[in-house]
């Protein structure tokens, strides 16, 4: 996170799973090339929006060439007047595009319901309003995780982040309600994300190769939907069918 609020992102993002031991070795290898981010440790909280039948995440899990999602994000648990980000995240041809606006926590939900305007009318706020008028999404799941962040010394747009304690809940879908939740994955592995605007630098490619770290296709929301929300809904349907039989 930087002091200047960035509203547009275009970059490549690669994800990797590391053990604590691999993380220590990896950081030692790349230590000469990175430094802690301006905010090196923080908690990210998200509310993901989707249609009633979860069409956005179901489409995403099919791995199409183009996909998009809508979420409201905060860094830590916000107060009523605390800053949150309303974001549209798109992916096309392996490139990630993110467009977002800032607003207060108390205004984010009314804005997305179409009953209150954004703090400032902009091209991005219009895009989000159009997205909502087209998909008619609602809050579906809260996802949070604890992050350590680094940036490149020579290129500050290169960012490497490490996420732990991935958790979710499907009730109290308000960022102001706290950052608690159930585990998304039962593992002590650490999710590393490499975010680069262009080609991967040689020193980073070499470190990944030496440790035999390979990219993985992993979505926090997608995994949460497939492993928890969908299974829970199927279990409910099965129970209801048995009771009515």
Image (cartoon, rainbow, N blue to C red):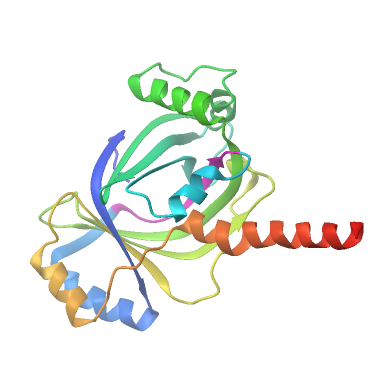
Residue placed at 18% from the left, 77% from the top? Answer: 209
Closest to the observer, 224 or 135: 135
Q: Position of residue 172 (x, y in %)?
A: 68, 45
Figure label count: 0
Examine the image and state in which quarter residue 229 appears: bottom right
Q: Main secondary structure of the magenta part?
A: strand
Magenta stretch?
38-51
- Quarter containing the C terminus: bottom right
> Against 56, is 200 above or below?
below
Left or right side of 189 for 115: right
Magenta highlight on residue 48? yes
Left or right side of 83 for 211: left
Q: Position of residue 240 (x, y in %)?
A: 84, 57
Q: Position of residue 228 (x, y in %)?
A: 62, 62
Q: Position of residue 187 (x, y in %)?
A: 51, 76
Left or right side of 24 for 208: left
- Which residue, as the protein is rendered here, is positioned at the far right? 244
Residue placed at 57% from the left, 37% from the top? Answer: 79
Residue placed at 17% from the left, 57% from the top? Answer: 152
Closest to the observer, 232 or 31: 232
Closest to the observer, 226 or 6: 226
> Against 119, is 131 above or below?
below
Res 183 visible: no
- Which residue, as the protein is rendered here, is positioned at the far front? 245
Magenta highlight on residue 170? no
Examine the image and state in which quarter residue 161 appears: bottom left
Res 212 visible: yes
């Amino acid at each position: 996170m930087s002091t200047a609020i960035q509203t547009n992102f275009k970059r490549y993002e690669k994800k990797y799973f590391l053990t604590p031991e691999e993380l220590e070795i990896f950081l030692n290898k790349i230590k000469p090339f990175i430094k802690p981010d301006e905010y090196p440790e923080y908690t990210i909280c998200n509310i993901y929006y989707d249609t009633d039948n979860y069409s956005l995440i179901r489409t995403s899990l099919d791995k199409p060439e183009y996909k998009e999602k809508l979420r409201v994000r905060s860094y830590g648990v916000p107060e009523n007047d605390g800053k949150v980000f309303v974001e549209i995240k798109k992916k096309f041809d392996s490139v990630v595009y993110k467009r977002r606006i800032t607003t207060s926590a108390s205004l984010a939900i009314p804005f997305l319901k179409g009953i209150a305007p954004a703090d400032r009318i902009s091209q991005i706020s219009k895009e989000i309003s159009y997205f909502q008028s087209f998909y008619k999404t609602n809050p579906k799941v809260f996802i949070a995780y604890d992050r350590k962040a680094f940036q490149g010394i020579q290129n500050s747009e290169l960012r490497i982040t490490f996420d732990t304690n991935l958790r979710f809940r499907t009730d109290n879908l308000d960022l102001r309600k706290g950052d608690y939740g159930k585990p998304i994955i039962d593992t002590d592995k650490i999710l590393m994300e490499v975010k680069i605007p262009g080609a991967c630098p040689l020193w980073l490619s070499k470190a990944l190769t030496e440790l035999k770290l390979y990219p993985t296709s992993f979505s926090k929301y997608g995994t949460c939907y497939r492993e928890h929300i969908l299974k829970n809904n199927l279990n409910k349907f099965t129970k209801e069918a048995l009771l009515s039989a």
